[in-house]
Image (spheres, rainbow, N blue to C red):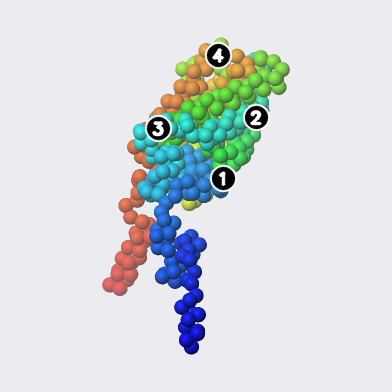
């Protein structure tokens, strides 16, 4: 017995292990409490690697994501991450929106490079499928109007094709850059306080460069500079006016922003269909808007809805004097939408009483009436 007691007392205790190596910590006296406290403290770099390990960096303005991949702004553990990437959470203030530290982030330039590449692909594909000689479009007939001419059939086919292209490209690039591919969407996310000023500048530069590269490729594919592209032409000799075209561009851009935000950026939709279906709905929204404004006014190609697309088409052909419409119209629509988004943000209007409570009250009144 004495020898057994001596062996027991002489056996050294195992060294204290950190809390990370003992996740359940079954024996509290053997747990290193100081290490456990250290392990429970937030580690910004580790959390950032954990988020990026799935290939999805947090960004509130990710098109088609319905704000599913964002951080909680009120969680103190996210303070370091939000200081590095302020638009990782929605509802930025002015200081966060114009924080210039974003120009120092390498990941921001990588995302902008993807925007340039994706915009080049989208612009070339969407312009080539609506390419036609630079002649004025045919006038509507007296019997069927524009519905029996290429003025209607051309945009109809192009809208169907572009719907598929946009949806698939959002699936391809959404996890990397947010899949804007359009200065209109970048303008809108900035004025809705979902993107920072550095992201706005870098994305606009990348999208414009991508559109210019697509225009040069389009000219090489067409073999001439004498062509026009749907949504990016206007023949004033046929009765089309620049002022009317501006109204079309403004309203078309506003409609596309509302629809894109409603199905692709509204956080309330992530519980209904979420990121799995949102890119398809965004593509359908873009195709519907393009078709809506394409054929009603003779001599007009309809709403451009993407300044980088028309910019690329004009790089390949020639720049008209009214090209400012394709930039001012989307900018004005984005500002108006940003004001509405600020005054009435998603989820700000709540029902007075849940539907279940109302039904329960009605059933209770019926039971009381039957008892009486």
Whole-number angstrom distance, CA of label 1 to CA of label 3:
25 Å
Circle nearer the N terminus (1, 3): 1
- The residue to which callout 4 is attached is 320
Q: Position of residue 124 (x, y in %)?
A: 64, 27
- The residue to which callout 3 is attached is 99
Query: Can residue 327 be seen here?
Result: yes
Badge 3 element: loop
Q: Position of residue 13 (x, y in %)?
A: 47, 71
Circle nearer the N terminus (3, 4): 3
Going by the image, does 350 lie left or right of 277?
left
- The residue to which callout 1 is attached is 55
Whole-number angstrom distance, CA of label 2 to CA of label 3:
35 Å
Residue found 55% across the figure and 27% down from its top: 206
Viewer-nearest residue: 65 or 197:
197
Whole-number angstrom distance, CA of label 2 to CA of label 1:
27 Å
Q: Position of residue 114 (x, y in %)?
A: 58, 33
Badge 2 element: helix
Whole-number angstrom distance, CA of label 3 to CA of label 4:
36 Å
Residue found 59% across the figure and 42% down from its top: 171
Viewer-nearest residue: 81 or 301:
81
Of marks 2 and 3, the one in the foreground = 3
Badge 1 element: loop
Circle nearer the N terminus (4, 1): 1
Dot 1 and dot 3 residues touching (CB under 8 Å): no
Whole-number angstrom distance, CA of label 4 to CA of label 2:
22 Å
- The residue to which callout 2 is attached is 125
Query: Few, some or many C-alpha atoms within 10 Å of disc 1 (few <14, some 14-19, many ≥20)?
Result: few
């Amino acid at each position: 017995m004495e020898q057994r007691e001596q062996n027991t007392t002489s056996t050294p205790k195992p060294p204290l292990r950190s809390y990370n190596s003992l996740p359940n910590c079954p024996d509290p006296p053997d747990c290193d409490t100081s290490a456990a406290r250290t392990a429970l403290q937030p580690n910004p770099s580790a959390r950032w690697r954990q988020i990026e390990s799935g290939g999805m960096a947090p960004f509130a303005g990710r098109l088609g994501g319905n704000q599913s991949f964002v951080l909680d702004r009120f969680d103190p553990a996210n303070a370091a991450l939000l200081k590095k990437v302020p638009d990782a959470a929605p509802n930025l203030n002015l200081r966060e929106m114009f924080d210039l530290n974003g120009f120092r982030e390498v990941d921001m330039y990588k995302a902008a490079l993807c925007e340039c590449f994706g915009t080049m692909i989208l612009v070339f594909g969407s312009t080539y499928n609506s390419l036609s000689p630079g002649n004025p479009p045919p006038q509507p007939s007296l019997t069927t109007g524009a519905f029996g001419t290429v003025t209607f059939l051309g945009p109809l086919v192009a809208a169907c094709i572009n719907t598929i292209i946009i949806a698939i490209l959002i699936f391809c690039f959404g996890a990397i850059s947010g899949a804007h591919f359009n200065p209109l969407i970048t303008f809108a996310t900035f004025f809705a306080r979902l993107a920072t000023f550095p992201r706005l500048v870098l994305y606009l530069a990348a999208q414009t460069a991508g559109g210019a590269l697509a225009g040069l490729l389009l000219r090489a594919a067409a073999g001439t500079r004498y062509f026009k592209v749907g949504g990016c032409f206007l023949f004033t000799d046929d009765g089309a006016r620049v002022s009317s075209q501006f109204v079309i561009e403004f309203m078309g851009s506003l409609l596309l922003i509302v629809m894109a935000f409603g199905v692709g950026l509204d956080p309330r939709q992530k519980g209904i269909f979420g990121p799995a279906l949102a890119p398809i709905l965004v593509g359908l929204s873009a195709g519907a808007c393009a078709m809506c404004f394409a054929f009603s006014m003779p001599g007009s190609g309809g709403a451009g809805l993407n300044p980088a697309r028309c910019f690329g088409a004009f790089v390949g052909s020639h720049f008209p004097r009214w090209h400012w419409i394709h930039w001012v119209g989307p900018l004005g629509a984005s500002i108006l939408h940003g004001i509405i988004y600020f005054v009435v943000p998603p989820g700000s209007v709540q029902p007075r009483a849940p539907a279940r409570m109302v039904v329960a009250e009605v059933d209770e009144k019926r039971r009381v009436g039957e008892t009486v």
